[in-house]
Image (cartoon, rainbow, N blue to C red):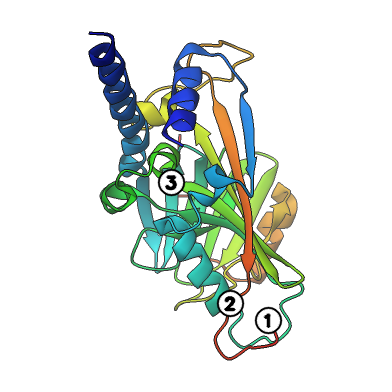
């Protein structure tokens, strides 16, 4: 009887472990443009670059993201009212997708860079 | 290793034990060495630097290894791989070895498919966030680069 109880406990534990890990199967990935995604996982929110067809990514910007926008050439991110990022969009596979990312910028610098780079994107996605 | 995974699971639900665990070059850490996520990170690292001879300063950071249904199946009966699910990987080179640092977070938010809240243990012990680091090293193995 004790062995049955112990084995039942072990089985329940394994099932619990599988439940805990299976939750990762339902992480959300919102496609932005090209290989760029807004992901929301147990680690929090991030702008990520997809590196293969097996749901593997490189994180570019993480943290409590607020607003996102994009056009064909840039992704813009508001982390909060004082921190903004500009991410250049690489069209194909790139092993250094973090190159060229600007930020964190304050609001004034962000708007100036947006003007200089002729970024057409507006903040169209509210991640909250 | 099943005991370790079971212990970490119990500690998560009961809010006991260490909130941060580090496994360094032991059997638990190396249980992830050939996981789907670690293999993907390794492939990415070697492809990233395939045209670079000197890997001294080579790194991969914030590699977000997916899990999904395929990961669930691939992990099979590996309790550490099942427990970790998806994880983040950082990699760097030291001498002739490639180091992996895998970071996993266990939280109630992930338990509720990211719909629920999560909290630190300092706020509420039971089911408060816990984290693990699994760190191991392996010889650099790049075909065509025999000096490594």
Residue drawn at (57%, 44%) of the image: B103
Q: Are marks 1 and 3 in contact (CB under 8 Å)?
A: no
Q: Report the disc number at residue B148.
A: 1
**Front tag of 2 and 3:** 2
Residue identified by numbered label 3: B86
Residue drawn at (51%, 53%) of the image: A47
In the rendered image, the quadrant that contains the C terminus of chain A is top left
- Residue B59: x percent and y percent? 67, 66
Name the N-terminal-most of marks 1 and 2: 2
Residue A72 sits in quarter:
bottom left
Residue B10 sits in quarter:
top left
Residue drawn at (37%, 44%) of the image: B78
Label 1: chain letter: B
Q: Report the disc number at residue B141.
A: 2
Label 2: chain letter: B
Label 3: chain letter: B
Residue drawn at (27%, 25%) of the image: A11
Question: Where is A14 relative to B134, above or below?
Answer: above
Q: Give how far apart the Cα atoms at labels 1 and 2 are.
A: 7 Å
């Amino acid at each position: 009887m004790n062995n049955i109880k112990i084995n039942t406990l072990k089985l329940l534990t394994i099932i619990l472990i599988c439940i805990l890990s299976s939750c990762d199967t339902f992480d959300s990935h919102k496609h932005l443009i090209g290989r760029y995604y807004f992901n929301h996982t147990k680690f929090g929110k991030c702008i990520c670059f997809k590196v293969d067809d097996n749901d593997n990514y490189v994180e570019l910007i993480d943290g409590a993201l607020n607003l996102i926008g994009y056009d064909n050439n840039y992704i813009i991110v508001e982390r909060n009212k004082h921190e903004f990022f500009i991410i250049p969009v690489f069209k194909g596979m790139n092993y250094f997708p973090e190159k060229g990312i600007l930020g964190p910028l304050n609001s004034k610098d962000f708007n100036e860079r947006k003007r200089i780079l002729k970024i057409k994107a507006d903040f169209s996605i509210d991640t909250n | 290793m099943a005991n370790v995974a079971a212990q970490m699971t119990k500690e998560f639900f009961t809010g006991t034990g260490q909130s941060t665990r580090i496994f360094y070059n032991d059997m638990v850490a190396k249980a992830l060495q050939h996981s789907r996520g670690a293999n993907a990170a390794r492939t990415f690292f070697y492809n990233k630097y395939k045209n670079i001879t000197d890997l001294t300063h080579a790194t991969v950071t914030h590699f977000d290894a997916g899990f999904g249904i395929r990961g669930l199946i691939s992990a099979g009966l590996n309790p550490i791989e099942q427990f970790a699910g998806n994880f983040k990987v950082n990699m760097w080179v030291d001498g002739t070895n490639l180091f992996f640092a895998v970071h996993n977070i266990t939280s109630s938010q992930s338990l509720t498919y990211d719909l629920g809240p999560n909290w630190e243990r300092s706020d509420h012990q039971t089911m408060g966030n816990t984290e693990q680091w699994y760190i191991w090293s392996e010889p650099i193995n790049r075909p065509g680069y025999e000096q490594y």
